Image (cartoon, helix red, strand yellow):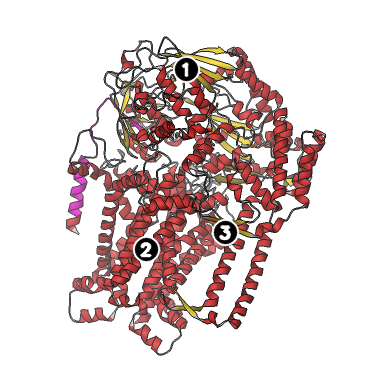
Amino acid sequence: MVALLFKRLFHGLVALWLIATLVFLLSRLLPGSSGSENILLANDTFYTGSSSSSRELAYRAYLRRTGLDKPTFYFTIGTSVEPDTLHTIYPEADRLLLQKLAWQFGSWPDVVKFFTAYKALHQNLTQLQEPKLLAHLQSLHRSVDPDVLLPASQRLRKILNGQHGSVELEQATRKLITKQQPYNALLPQIRWHGSQNQYHQWLTEAVQGNLGNSYRDSGAVTGHIGQAISTTWWILLLSMTLTTLLAVELSILFVRKRGAKWRRAILPFLFFTDRIPLFILALLLLILFASPDFLQLFPVYGMGTYIPTGQTWLQNALNMLPFMVLPIICLVLVNLPYVTNQFYSSLADVSEADYIRTAKAKGLSEGKIIRQHMLRNALFPIITLLSDFLPTLVAGVVVIETIFAIPGVGRLLIESVLARDYPVLVGVVLVVALFKVMSHFISDLLYGLADPRIRQIT
Amino acid sequence: MKKTATLVCFLFLLLSFCSQPQRQPDEVRVRLFNDPENLNPINYQNSSALQIINLLFQSLLTVDLEDNGLKPLLAEELPVIEQGDTTTLFNYKIREEAEWADGSPVTATDVAFTLKVMMAPLVNNEQIKSQIEFVRDFIHDKTDPKRFTLVCRSFSPEMELLTGDFFILPEYLFDPDRLLKHFSIQELVEAAPELENNKNLIAFAGQFNNVKFARDKDVLKGSAGYELENWTTGQYVVLKRKENWWGAHAAAATTYLTAFPEQINFQIIPDNTTALLALKNKQLDVLSNIPAADFDLLKKDAAFTQDYALAAPDSYEFNYVALNTRHPKLNNRYTRLALAHLLDVESLIKVTLTNYGTRTVGPVPPAAEPFYNAGLTPYPYSQAKAENLLKEGGWRHEDNGWYKTVEGKKERLTLEVNYRAGNTVFENSSLIFQQHAAKLDIPVVVQALESSLSKQKSQNHEFEMTFRSLSGNPFIFNFKPFFHTSFSAQGGSNITGFGTPETDALLDAINAAQTEREKARLLKELQRILHEEAAIIPLYYLKERIAVHKRFANTKISGLKPNYDVSAFTLKD
Amino acid sequence: MQALYNDIKQLWRQKIAFRVALCYLAGFTLLAVLLPWLPLRYMPNDINLDKVYAAPCMGGSNSNWFGTDALGRDVFANTLFGARTAILISFPVASFTALLGLVLGTTAGFFGDSGFKTKRVHVIVSVIAAVFLVYLGLYVPIKARVLLPSNTSLIYYSVASLILVFVVLWGLARLLWVRFAWFHKPIALPVDQIILRIIETLTSVPRLIFILVLASFLPPTVPMLAILLALTYWTGIARLARAEMLKIKNLPYFESARSIGVTQSAMVFRHALPNMLGPLLISFTFALASLLTFESTLSFLGIGIPNTLPSWGRTIAGIRHNAAAWWLLAFPGTFLLATVMALQVTNYYILAIIQARKK
């Protein structure tokens, strides 16, 4: 048993590492980053006090400061047409153009020649202040189709009478097209970056318990997550306990002989609540129980009001209690149908078994049979379900946290995704995964305890 | 079962008693739609943070929401400007009375320190750094520690605002060890690469980039009338009025140097419906950005209007459609004009905004009457006119579509319209346009783009037609970033690629105009050209929708963000 | 099969609820199929700006029976077409999800960590093939699509070379198999562990991140989201199927069946699957229902997709912008509820038959 436990623990750690790696890499695939949002893509106002070049410089300084200019992983598998140094090219629009050209034409030296000729002409035309011609040049930037590039470069040469480097551009274009090896992109190439990469840095820190700092306020990620968990901890725990208890009681009620009429009355209601999208359910509850138009029983939002003087924890809890009622009701209503159904169906399954009939024949009371014999044997699906329950709760409360204005883990996650705050994003997923792996571990343990036969097999 | 029922009933009863906490009358409760996240005056991230920092720190100049005019705040008067050939000098004097939280005076040294923080390498200042890229040097006055001169490169009209727009930091709190003292502004402007290895700079950056300067109430103390009392992430931010604040004794003429409410309580409520419910429950005193449909309902609600005043000032938020003039399909102005005639703006305002919008002919707000070109009429919605314009643009109508030979290829007129995902107003507007264009056999694909992707695509000219918004103001009309060709490169803010040497000259002339009349004439000319070229299709200026509790007077409701001045609120009687 | 048919026929005669539910489902399917040919007054995407948020009204020649939404679109037409979308998208996706979960979960439970044995050569060749599949079958086509939207030949060449690689690998496998005895040795694949790890990983990464990553490559559309949902939703069903399989595997009759020499597949199909049907049908119904309204939740969180596909979720989501327009929730909501209830009732009776037959 102990050896088995260690094996499970090891598997859990591997799973954790896999999840963290996957999320880390996925998050780097998201478009934009916290820095580029705020620095490069300044919001539109009547005046912008800065040119795009100075913003570009600031952006690169930002990347250097945060280490985001390093490669993401130890190695990259890419196509052989892209050079190793592609990721060092700025601005990013130029990098993208070079990449497109490389994929289209497959010969890097010719791409570079074309690009330098293009840049030189662009420089010359900017100095000449010829916006109309610049538009022509821009069409070269828009497409990498040979049927567009060649005519466009020829037209430019004609308009410019071969001056300002337009001849060179046309020659480079011609060479690019005649010497193209378009299917070079199919050849893979592995590039090794060594330990100077973002993932390595993050992982070494994470192993030591440091999940990095938020991009938004430079606060420690662990602090942010801790705070978010502490605000929603009671809501999650209470709603989960309440749901499980209610589900067990209800399914026992249903399975009883006299329970059929209860089942017919309650089940449709549960289905009804389950079918309503969560945000509508929450708003409905708010309108019913927290608005002056109907019943004004509970406060609308938040987790307590600010009271300046020091308070005991009991006063604090009493202060928070009314705020938690609606969110908890909401969560219970949302999760109850599914859980009850699963409990009920496994209980109903067991009730057909031979030993139950034997027990009945022995004259045991119905309640005793259900609680002592059936429940124990129906534990399997219940354990599976519960082990997945807590993490789903954590990730699923986003809507409720938004509506009731509770700063919990769900909101932290969605806000970090939308703000591209990678360290917080990866941190939240990691913590949720930790919960999950732990609960799976515990459920495996319980499996073993509940059914000795499984211990031997797994 | 019965026991549980009684228990639940009992709980409900108990809770109903504590659902309405007691409130102080001179505490103002304001809704924020997101957490400020970071209250550092140099690297704050969102508008909620800006609104709060404005009550903690002060800049040299400010906009008085009473009349939307630029006024001196920490400065005694608007700067004296000396325009030279290559440089412009801005001479400022800080108010005599102005002092920090510990009673020490605000001096030119603090301003210089702030500029140094904004310029220093390694410091988390990248967002704001480029805002003051035109500042070249800083000259202390030899005799008066409150006087100084900013040396700036060339001249543009917004410079006056920008030189006074940043929050002044107290050196004694932000740099107690005087690590930046020995650097000169000029040195930092030149930004030699070896600065990045300087011991003092590394030490300062290490300190400043710390979370302490984003959240700590002992450090975030400025010269304004409020102090941070409590900030519970995601729930509330409480500000308390300073005792004995210098502004209270300052010259009587400054009606905008205010800190009246004893306590300001910012409540963070992300969802609109919840905020609205909280307002109806009187848990909030101020709510802005109320959805148009709900605003209309509130207006009709007699019980509500007894306690709350509703206002819908003309805002400076401008919605428009940008067309990519560099796209071969759209580089002809007749084509663009045809599309402009296919946009039923009147209906858009009626349906998507329930009439809370004001139509405009161009980017100058109709509220800025002297500059608005009233001689132009907005494009009418007309299928027939659009059809004629398309024909003039070289398109031929055949087999249920419009065709034209573009760059040697026969191409069909199709359009891809994109907007920022999650914006319902734009989504509905695109769908309406799609239907109207379909009547004329123009297939339109509507696409929602994730916010940063949408910005990226526009700035790289990788779009055809896009819905956008622009926030402006009534005092600076510098349209260079949007229409000047020098901003039209990849990543520039002139996303439409509009511009000719003539319009460039016109834009420069607007910025150099010496008199208001001259400026008005030039701006009207610009609007006329924009109207003819239709690189952007102007839609409307939005009306802001605000509710404020009636026990407050002097709310200074304005079209400018944040649409009210909470520090000026006074209790009626 | 004959017996099952007879049972159903009997149920049909005896239980009114069953009859109603089946009729409803049949009518629903028929409607969805025939809808394009029905003479409808409005189409679901027809915008009418003069009749925004019109209340339901029965009389008149051009009235909207179920009212209209924010853009004056007819709610009646949207409800009907929403049913069609439900049949054409949500049903296949939910079925696919259930099937995927069932297959993977049963496999994991049945083989465990040591039950699945294969030859060394197969493992090695499959791994190499998988690497090429990811590079030539996914990476190159997606990159090419994003970078060079007009250049499709690169994608064709990529797929062609992938097939070529597969053929070569197959030949290589044959060659190795004949020449070297080392490759003959069987290895046990820890199927259970692999599938469990995949489940854990998938359920731990928020779906939102998948959607946003997807949106950065390709414009998100409803079918795209449906595929993504199918690929992430199967985990719940798989875990249930695995747990049931583990339980069934240890029941006495399963062991005795094995001892009398019934083949593995026959054991799974004859004995294990019918036992799992109960929980699976429930999961399927729930997955279906959450698919039906998922997009309305997405639009609540501000991750909108341009919705030109009429669906119940789209209409219901409209209530957020005008709480007074109750008809946006009421009509599609009723249909949604009725559909799920009908499914539930049918499920219930079919389960009852199966249980009765087990006895």
Question: Which numbered dot is residue A12?
Answer: 2
- Who's the residue at 55% across and 45% down the image? B448
Chain letter behind tag 2: A
Would you call the spot at circle 1 few (<14 residues within 10 Å), some (14-19), or many (20 or more)? few
Lateral position of residue C168 relative to residue B246, left or right: right
**Label 3 SS:** helix
Which tag is nearer the camera, tag 1 or tag 2?
A: 2
Q: What residue is disc 1 on?
A: B69
Q: Disc 1 is attached to a residue of which chain?
A: B
Whole-Å distance between the Cαs marked 1 and 2?
Answer: 63 Å
For the residues beneath circles 3 and 1, the answer to whether they share a chain is: no
In this rendering, position of residue B467 left or right of residue B441? left
Residue A283 visible within the image: no
* Mark 2 neighbour class, 10 Å CA radius: few under 14, some 14 to 19, many 20 or more: many
Mark 3 residue type: Leu
Q: In which quarter of the image is residue B375?
A: top right
